[in-house]
Image (cartoon, rainbow, N blue to C red):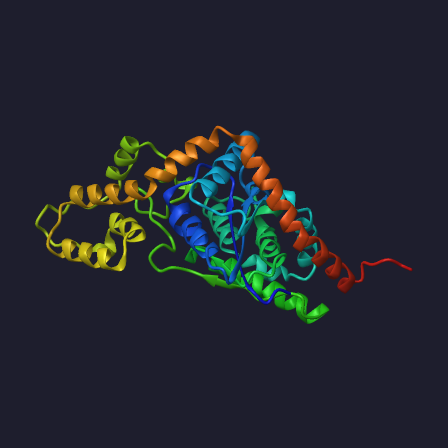
Amino acid sequence: MSQRKRVLTGITTTGTPHLGNYVGAIKPAIESSRDARTDSFYFLADYHALVKCFEPERVHRSTLEIAATWLALGLDTEKSVFYRQSDIPEIPELTWLLTCACAKGLMNRAHAYKAQVAENEAAGEDPDHGITMGLFSYPVLMAADILMFNAHDVPVGKDQVQHLEMARDIAGRFNHRYGEHFVLPEAVTDEHVATLPGTDGRKMSKSYDNTIALWLPEKKLRKAIMKIKTNSQEPGEPKNPDDASVYAVYAAFATPAQRAEMRQAFADGIAWGEVKQQLFERVNAELAVPRERYEALINEPAKIEHELKLGAERARDVAAPFIRSLREAVGIRALG
C-alpha cells in the first residue's frame, strides 16, 4: 500500500452540478489535490447513477457536465487521477468480494433504505415496494469505490458519514477474514459546507427541485439566489443567521472574517434583499472565470473523453494488481 495519503471523492452523474456539489465536494477536493503530499482520486460515479435514474440520456449528459465542471474549476489531471467509475472493471468485481463479507444487517440500517421503507409503510404499501437491490446494497459499491484505492480521507457532507462508517465496517470484516488488505477510511467534513440548504431551506438536492445550478449565467444566477426562502422579518429587525438558509449558503463562500461580519449584520437587522445581493456578488465573483472555461469545455466532449481515458489508465495501474492480490486472498487463483 502507498505510504502517501490518498484522498478520494466522487459525484453521481444524475443531474446538472449545483452549488451544493461545488462547495460540499468539488471545491474542497480540488483544493486538496494541490497538496504535494497527497495522491488524489476523483471520479464520476455513473454506476451509482443507475440506482435511481432510469434515463440513459440524462446519465450521459450529466457525465459530460460534471466532467467539464471539474476541469473548468481547475482540477490538475497531471497531479490527480480523474476517471469514470464504469471505466474501472475492477470496481464491480471488488463490490462482489465485499458483498460476500458484508452483513445484511448493516445494509438494513442504511439511511436511504430505511427512509424508503418508512415512506412505503406510511403509504400503506409493502415495506419493500419499489426498492431495488441497487438501492439496498449501493453502500457496498461506495465502499468498493473507496477501498479499491485504499483512500485515507474521503471529503463528504455530514449526510454521507454513515456510508464511510459502513465502508470501515466492511473493510474491517474483510481484513479480519482474509488479512490486512484495506486502509480504514476517514470521513472529512467541513462544518460550514457539510450540507448546503437549497432555495426552500431543505438540503440542496435534485430530488427536492431546490438546487441552484452551478453554471447559470449571471442574471439567472442572481434571480435564483433571490428566490431563496426567508422569513417575514423586516429590515432593522435582528435576525438569527443560524436559522437562515441564505446565511448558510453565504458561509460556504465566505472567509471566517466575512462570516463574522455577516453575523453582525444579521444582529444589526440587515434586510433580506441585501443579504441575497451580497451572496450573489460573492458567488458570481468566484465563478465568473471558471464559467467561461466550462462553456468552452462543454463544446469539446472529445477533449473531456480523452482526459477520462487517461485517468482510467492511471486508475487501473493501481486497481488491476490490487484486485489480483485480493483474488489470491479469497482463494480465486490458478490451479497450477
Q: Position of residue 146 (x, y in %)?
A: 58, 57
Residue sitting nearer the eye, 19 or 245:
19
In this picture, residue 15 sits left or right of residue 267? right
Residue sitting nearer the eye, 199 or 304:
304
In this picture, residue 151 sits left or right of residue 334? left
Question: Can residue 132 be seen in this snapshot?
Answer: no
Question: Can residue 196 be seen in this snapshot?
Answer: yes
Q: Is residue 48 above or below residue 220?
A: below
Q: Quadrant of residue 19?
A: top left
What residue is shown at x 76% (from left), y 59% (from top)?
A: 327
What residue is shown at x 54% (from left), y 41% (from top)?
A: 52
Residue with the most extreme left position? 236
In what quadrant of the picture does the C terminus appear? Answer: bottom right
Q: Is residue 116 above or below residue 326?
A: above
What residue is shown at x 32% (from left), y 52% (from top)?
A: 252
In what quadrant of the picture does the N terminus appear? Answer: bottom right
Q: Position of residue 3 (x, y in %)?
A: 59, 67
Q: Position of residue 287 (x, y in %)?
A: 34, 41
Q: Quadrant of residue 309?
A: top right
Tally of numbered tags: 0
Residue sitting nearer the eye, 134 or 161:
161
Q: Position of residue 209 (x, y in %)?
A: 38, 38
